[in-house]
Amino acid sequence: MTMRAVVLDAPGPVTDLHIRELPVPEPAEGWVRIKVKAFGLNRSELHTRLGLAEGVTFPRVLGIEAVGVVDADPSGTYAADQQVMAMMGGMGRVFDGGYAEYTCVPRSQIVPFKSELDWAVLGAVPEMLQTANGSLTVGLDAQPGQRLLIRGGTSSVGLAAAILAKRIGMTVLATTRSEAKAEAMARAGVDHVLVDDGDVAVQVRRLFPAGVDAALELVGTPTLPDTLRATRVHGTVCFTGMLSNEWIVKDFYPIHYLPAGVRLTAYSGDAADLSPEVLQSYLDDVAAGRAAVPLDRVFELDQVREAHAFMESDGAKGKLVVVT
């Protein structure tokens, strides 16, 4: 039996993404085969395609996440057709990932759920929710009533973080480089949309002279110093994203780089950081209209090159999803 999958033979342009017929993979001991219904696009896969990711072997089926139903579980832990999300743990880097009609993943990378939401909507959730939730809880210890700055507010993680932050009662400030994206941010619950002019700290302190309590850095090291300056004494900045493709601080001198009393941490999680309870609660809230999924565009598998090009152009106002 064969399947269609998106294969990258070596780093390169979008034209190096090829849809090929491959054998349907067999799950090893401790692994589960998933019939993929949809998968989200991530900057991680863009980094892999551009040759910026470490530890990747080629040829490789990309994709650090997928949603679908269990097709085979040798251990019997999951019943056939159980809805699941899979993410991280080497997907799309050290073993073939979610850009395919079937994928095999370690059982530890699976989070089960039950939902009648459309597969395209569900496909936007795994990595986006895991990263946003982990950044707020583990990275920032976010609390009701706090003021949160999201740097990179129109990214899928940024929009998801805004939605989650509003659910716990935070005041949300978020940045964008384009005023045209302000409406999408407002729909996510952002209280103050800031057009990024390179000096966001000044804008923040006009609104809140002491600075924000917490800041989520999703752009990368080019904007990190400004984000730190926007944060109050004893406030926390969590470095999570690298939309700029820059993540190294050169010649780091802490006393010069860090404002006095401002804390800098980071978040990089895994499937284990997203509990089935948190996932199910979020999906139930979406189904009931109490929360939203920031889904921008949906593509077919044959349109994966177009989808990658759009991701690379930074034109998205939310998550990009491919349905199989």
Image (cartoon, grey):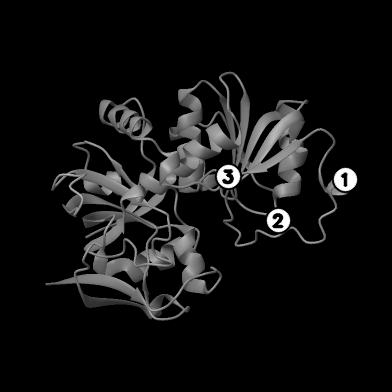
Judge the density around disc 3: few (<14), some (14-19), many (≥20) Cα neighbours within 10 Å. Answer: some
Distance from Cα at disc 3 to Cα at disc 2:
18 Å
82 and 153: which is toward the camera: 82
**Tag 1 residue:** 255
Tell me the SS state at disc 2: loop
Q: From the viewer's perspective, tell me whether residue 48 is left or right of residue 287.
A: right
Sequence-wise, the earlier of marks 3 and 2 is 2
Above or below, 323 against 210 in this view is below
Judge the density around disc 1: few (<14), some (14-19), many (≥20) Cα neighbours within 10 Å. Answer: few
Dot 3 amino acid type: Tyr
**Tag 3 residue:** 267
**Tag 2 residue:** 222
**Residue 79 in view in this figure:** yes
- Would you say the residues marked 1 and 2 are in contact, meaning their CB atoms lie under 8 Å apart? no
Dot 2 amino acid type: Pro
Dot 1 amino acid type: Ile
Residue at 25% across / 69% down in the picture? Answer: 302
- Picture coordinates of residue 169, whole percent (x, y): 52, 20
Above or below, 235 against 61 in this view is above
Sequence-wise, the earlier of marks 1 and 2 is 2
Q: From the viewer's perspective, tell me whether residue 150 is left or right of residue 117.
A: right
- Would you say the residues marked 3 and 2 are in contact, meaning their CB atoms lie under 8 Å apart? no
Residue at 55% across / 39% down in the picture? Answer: 135
Above or below, 117 against 219 in this view is above
- Picture coordinates of residue 11, whole percent (x, y): 47, 78
Distance from Cα at disc 1 to Cα at disc 2:
18 Å
**Res 104 label:** none
Judge the density around disc 2: few (<14), some (14-19), many (≥20) Cα neighbours within 10 Å. Answer: some
